[in-house]
Structure formats: C-alpha cells, structure tokens
Image (cartoon, rainbow, N blue to C red):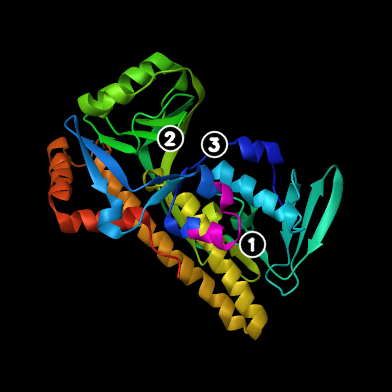
Amino acid sequence: MERHSRDYVEQRVRAGVLEKSTVDLMHALGIGERLAREGLVHSGINLTLGGELFRIDLKALTGIAVTIYGQQEVMKDLYEAAKARGISVFFEAKDVQLQEFSDTHPFVNYTRNERAERIDCDFIAGCDGFHGVSRSSIPPEALRTEGRTYPFSWLGILADVPPANSELIYASHENGFALASMRSPTRSRYYLQCAADEDIGEWPDERFWDELCVRLGRVAAPGVTRGPSVEKGIAPVRSFHAEPMRHGRLFLAGDAAHIVPPIGAKGLNLAAADAAILAETFAEFYRSGSEAVLERYGPRALARVCGAEEFSRTFLEMTHRFANGPSRAMQCAQLEKLLRSQEALTDFARGYVGVPLT
C-alpha cells in the first residue's frame, strides 16, 4: 500500500548512492537491467580541505565501488517488476489502520477510491517512513527509542546542469559543509549546511551558487555549472532508531524504524537491507514453521543500522561546523590525519561502501 500516487513517487527526487549490496540485490531480483545500463559507477569520492581536493579511491581500498542511481528510479523498476509478476500495489491508500497485529491474524483497514477496504494477512511489514502509521501503532511502552536532532539542516537544490565533478565532492569549510552530487550526467544535486531555522526565501539561486563555490574551494569550484534550480528545499539532519523492530506480527523496516544523517547516503541502502533480511526471515518461517525464526530479524537488521549510524555521525562531525563542537583547527587536524593514514582511509572507505548483505 502506498499513500501517494505512482506518478508522485516516481517523480520524487531522493537518495542516489547505491551500495554494492543494494545493486547486487536488484540484480538478484531480476530488476537490474536498467540500473546496469544507466547507473553511474563511482570507484571513489572526493574531500576538500583548505581549498584543495583529495580523492579517496574506494575501489583500491576495499575492492568495492558505489553506483549513482536515484531512489525514484529504483521505485520505477520495482513497480514495473511488480506489475509483470502480478503483485498488487495499492496507490493512494488513505486512513490506514493496522489491526490485531499482536495476535496471529492481523489485518489492515484502509480507504481507496472512497471505498473502505480490508486486507487479512499473516504479517505486516511497516515500510511507511518516519511519520507513517506503523511505528505509531505500537504501544509506546513496547518501544525503546534513541535519537538526536542536529543544530543545522541541509539546503539542497536540483538543477539540470552537468555535475561539478565525475565523482561526489564532500567539502569541509569554515562556513560549513557542502556536497556536490549528481543524479545523471546532465542533472546535479547540491547541498549546503544551513541553520536549523533557515528561511529558504533568503536563498535565491545566485546566492546558493556563490556560497557553494566558496565552500567547494579554488580547485573544485571551477567545475560548477550554474543554472536555474528545478527543486529547492531544506531538510533537517537527525538520527533515530527504535527497537525492537518487531511487535507481534508487525515488522518495522526502513525509515519507520531508523533515520541516519544523510551524509553517508545510508538510508535507502539500510531500507533495502531491511527488506531483504525480512524476506529471508519470512521464507525461513514458512519453511520451518518456527516462531523463533521471527526473532532474528530485528537484531540482525539493527546491527547494520547502528554501524551505519556511527559512520554517518563520525563523517558528519568531521565535515560540519558546530556552534559548540570541535574547533575548526581540531576539525582540520582530524581530516588531515584521515587523509595521511592508509589504515584510517581504509576504515573510512569500508564504512562508506557499506557492509555486505550476508
């Protein structure tokens, strides 16, 4: 069930960095043909410090690359595969209510096309995001939650211009963090660290481009092609996870269970891993009939989440400006130490490319 229309989901621009585990999963599902054709394989990323550009060779350090392929493109592939395989996707489902999931016979009530409908099921997978109904349906006393909202946000724009570089650039600057990313060879995605209460009306395109070039520095900035933004928005930076990720017959997955800071591009990849682990859990349950199998999902999925959360937090603290955080001198020293140490670079690269799905 999907709250929005198919067109809305397929046009909504979201994360774009796929770890190898996600790429492998799509190929295993038989939906990787367009990904292989259109995805941009990146064997490295770049950091800027003091105006200089430093490349981190992910492939050389780990043997693994990442792929640029937008979340909306993943959804298109999933929807097409569902249609071909006779899997029903109910779009524009409203007033969703999860019922009796503490029992062995859960069901879901919802409204679609102004008609009340019901689905009876063995299990419910709550993949409906941070603000969805799934987690909020669980009694609060049954969940342990941990989270942090950072004292800044990300101001992002999308523009139909060539990317500033063939690979992503993460910029650490005294004015704050910046990210130069892309969705295709002709569509770029850029972000600037901004105040948590920033007024987007104070950021016309010209001001954004000027500040982006300042933060990218003298080596990277000349690669920026300016153009009108086709999308502009401000997103909070936060981390959160809830456990256990199962309550009775209800299983939480993706943003319904956890949020990680966006800098490591972990959100989509963690959600895909959750779905894969949950599918394996259900398959094993139907093979064995053992209720004990169901208990394994949460701890296995959460272990990946905690590792990704730690990586993203560390990367965030190395590159963003905090009002009451490390001094700029200390931050630069941390980054210089990272760039000088083969061991530190290897650990960082492993965190960036992600843990294999085993």
Query: Magenta stretch containing residue 261, yes or no?
Result: no
As shown in the figure, which amino acid type bears the numbered disc 2? Met
Q: Which mark is residue 262?
A: none
**Residue 1 as seen in the image, left or right of residue 21:** right
**Residue 206 as seen in the image, left or right of residue 136:** left
Measured Cα–Cα span from mark 1 to mark 3: 24 Å
Quarter holding residue 142? bottom right
- Residue in the foreground of this view, choosing between 156 and 53: 53
As shown in the figure, which amino acid type bears the numbered disc 1? Ala
As shown in the figure, which amino acid type bears the numbered disc 3? Val
Please say if 254 is above or below 56.
below
Question: Residue at the spot x=75%, y=47% of the render?
Answer: 93
Q: Which mark is residue 13?
A: 3
Q: Is residue 257 visible?
A: no
Residue annotated with mark 1: 125
Q: Residue 151, how many percent across, how many down?
A: 35, 37
Q: Quadrant of the C terminus?
A: bottom left
Q: Dot 3 lies on which element?
A: loop
Among the two numbered marks 1 and 3 on one chain, the one whose residue lies closer to the N terminus:
3
Measured Cα–Cα span from mark 2 to mark 1: 31 Å
The stretch of residues the image draws in magenta is: 24-34
Q: Which mark is residue 182?
A: 2
**Residue 44 as seen in the image, left or right of residue 341:** right
**Residue 94 as seen in the image, left or right of residue 192:** right
Among the two numbered marks 2 and 3 on one chain, the one whose residue lies closer to the N terminus:
3
